[in-house]
Structure formats: C-alpha cells, structure tokens
Image (cartoon, helix red, strand yellow):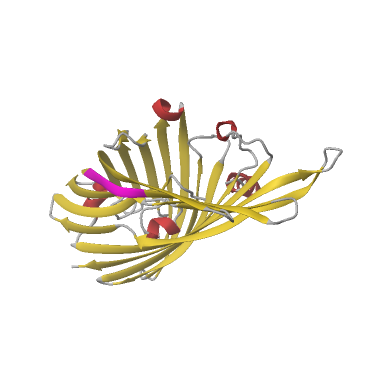
Amino acid sequence: MIQALLVFLTGLTLPGITSQGDRFLYHDARSAAMGGVSIVLESTANPASLALFNDKAVFFSGRLAVQSERRGLRVYDSFGNNIGIATLANNTATYAGPGPCAFIFPLRFISFGLQYAPVWDHNYYYREEHRDDFYQLTSIDELSYSGYLNALAPMVSFRYRSISVGLEQDFLFGALQMTRTVIMPDADSVYREETELAGRKTRFGASITPSINFRLAYTYQHSYALDNGGDEYPSTHAFGVMYQPPGRIPTRFAGQIEYEIWDELWERNILIYKLGVEHMIQSKYYMRYGFCIFPDYTQAALWTTNLTAGFGLNAGRYSVDLGYAYGKRDYLAGDFPYLDFTSDYVFDETGHHLLITAGVHF
C-alpha cells in the first residue's frame, strides 16, 4: 500500500513553473509552504475564515520570484537521427514585490476584513541572439512583460456555532507593460505598450469546523473580464479539508482541489491539486511542506508542478512565516500549432518563489 502511494505521488509530480499569465498558486507564506492550500487555513484566502480569528490582526507579506527559461533546437544528422540540442537562449529574470496584506477585525458573531493580494502574474523576459553560419552576431531579440493583476477586497464573515460564511468584493487593478527590442549592427528598434488593468469580481466562502481536529471549506468565484475588454478569467470552485489526528499528534494534513471552468474561453475545464502538511513543535514552531500540480489552461498536456517547503514562528502576539516553492514545467508533451513553429524546439522552464509573512495580533 505504501509503495503504491509513493509511486502515485512520484508520477503525479514528475511533469510540470509558474510563468507569464499564470495565477498565483499560493496566498501567503504559510500556504506557499503547504503546496498552495489556503481556504482551510486561518487566513484571508477564504472570506469565511475571518471567523476563525479571535483577535484583531494585521499581516504583511513580501515576495521574490526568479524565473528561468531555456530554449533549444533539436539537431539532426543527414540520416534524420537526433544528435543533440543546440541552445538558443538561457534567460533568468528576478521579480520582487509586496505579497498579500490584510487587516482583520473580529466581533462575536461577525468579522470584518480588508486585504490586498496579487492575483495573476504577467511577468516574463526572453532574450535570444541570432548568428549567421560563421557564428557572427546578426541581431538580438528581447521581449519583456511586467505587471500584476491585483485585488483590493473588503470582506465580511458571519458565524453561527461551527459554521461560518463570508463574502468579499474584489476591486481589481494593475498595469501590464510590454517592451520588444530588436538590436542590429546598423539599427535598433524598440516598441513599448502599456495597458491599464481594472475590473471587479465577487467571491463567496463557507467554512465548517465541527471540532478542532477537522475542518471543511468551500469558495466560489464567478467568471469575470477586465473593464478594457482584455483578458477573461474563469469561474472557480475550490474545496478544502484539514485533519489533525486526535490525541497528542501535532501534525495537520490539508488538501485542496480547485475546479476552473474555462468552457467559454478555451473550451476545457481543469483541476488543480494541492496537498500540504504542517507539523507543530510546542505550538510555537512550525515545519511545513507540500506540492501543487495543475495543467495549462491552453494545453491540457502541459502540467506544472510546484514542490514547496517552509517554516513558521508564533511568539504570542507576533508571528513570522517563510515559504518557498520550486516549480517546473516540461514541454515535451506540448503541441504548439498556434505558435506556428517551423522548427523542432525544446523548452524548459523553472521558477523559484520565496515569501515571508509577518503578523501582529492585538
């Protein structure tokens, strides 16, 4: 039984980076360390979770992301045998910025909150050198996107015994900058474009806590489009569960499944799987790890895998959490007819995400 489970988990995590145009798989540092599991935790990832706080609290987060893309070209001999891969580009870009920040004000049966959170990541950088048959540099192409789609969301939660429900209204904002540069020996060209991002969406959440050892959670977010007629985003159902064995076992097991409905956009729906474990030491120190996998919404054959780990410290009124996620996407199963590639390209993308979240309870 254990061997079968290990084979299943290994096969599940083999394929698979967050890249330009992807959702954030995590909410804060704690969820990043637990494979992106968030809606069953005591956080603002689920508006119903506000009822799990007994004290007023403020949270601040910071993020650092390092994304790398390698692009190669398969080389064949005169007999059609693949004799290797010629490297065309090997690029790395670093992005830093604020993560989710929140203020929570709980009362007896009702709780209020306000949060800021980045929702979609649009950062991307690619640079490629072109050379002639004598390996002389003929041109350099640089393409970069930068920007995030962010949300500012007031939230409210109502609680009755072990059941709590919550609602949040997200006001979306951000900017997307695109720069295309072509450098040639005799002339250069630069093209820039900037798009303002704005919109609104609503999210509903529910949480059931029948005991301190078990918790269920659900959130629903409707499909929405940006005000400028740009990108459209799917409706999402998310289900989460957390279980801690009774007795003196200080370990929590959490899982979350998200169902994204892309029917109207890409004529497919996708499932996102998240698993995480949190081990407590004297109710003060926390060790966490997990993983998250999801297919690309444009190509179901491409899977993204994120392996995560982190730790936390709870010192009474103050808390600090650190989360790290390593992501990889393997394009071997990809099919790119819409890119009109005439050559046999090989892609490899990896990503590193580091988050830190600090909280103060009053």
Q: Position of residue 237 (x, y in %)?
A: 36, 36
Front in this rendered view, residue 277 or 16: 16
Check if residue 175 falls in the magenta segment: yes
Which residue is located at x 20 percent, y 57 percent? Answer: 104
Q: Which residue is pictured at 19% across the width and 53% down the height?
A: 113
Percent across and percent down for residue 349 are 57, 51
Q: Which residues are magenta?
A: 169-176
Q: In this rendering, is residue 279 above or below 132?
A: below
Can residue 109 be seen here? The reply is yes
Q: Is residue 353 visible?
A: no
In the image, residue 33 above or below residue 49: below
**Residue at image coords 51%, 39%:** 296
* In magenta segment, residue 336: no
Pinpoint residue 315: horizontal percent, then vertical percent: 30, 73
Q: Nearer the viewer, residue 48 or 143?
A: 143
Horizontal relation, residue 298 to residue 11: left or right: left
Q: Residue furthest bottom?
A: 315
241 sits to left or right of 8: left
Q: Quadrant of residue 263?
A: top left
Q: Quadrant of the C terminus?
A: bottom left
Who is closer to the viewer here, 276 or 247?
Answer: 276
The picture places residue 299, in percent across and down from the top left corner, at 54, 35
108 on left or right of 194 = left
245 or 11, nearer to the observer:
11
79 left or right, relative to 224: right
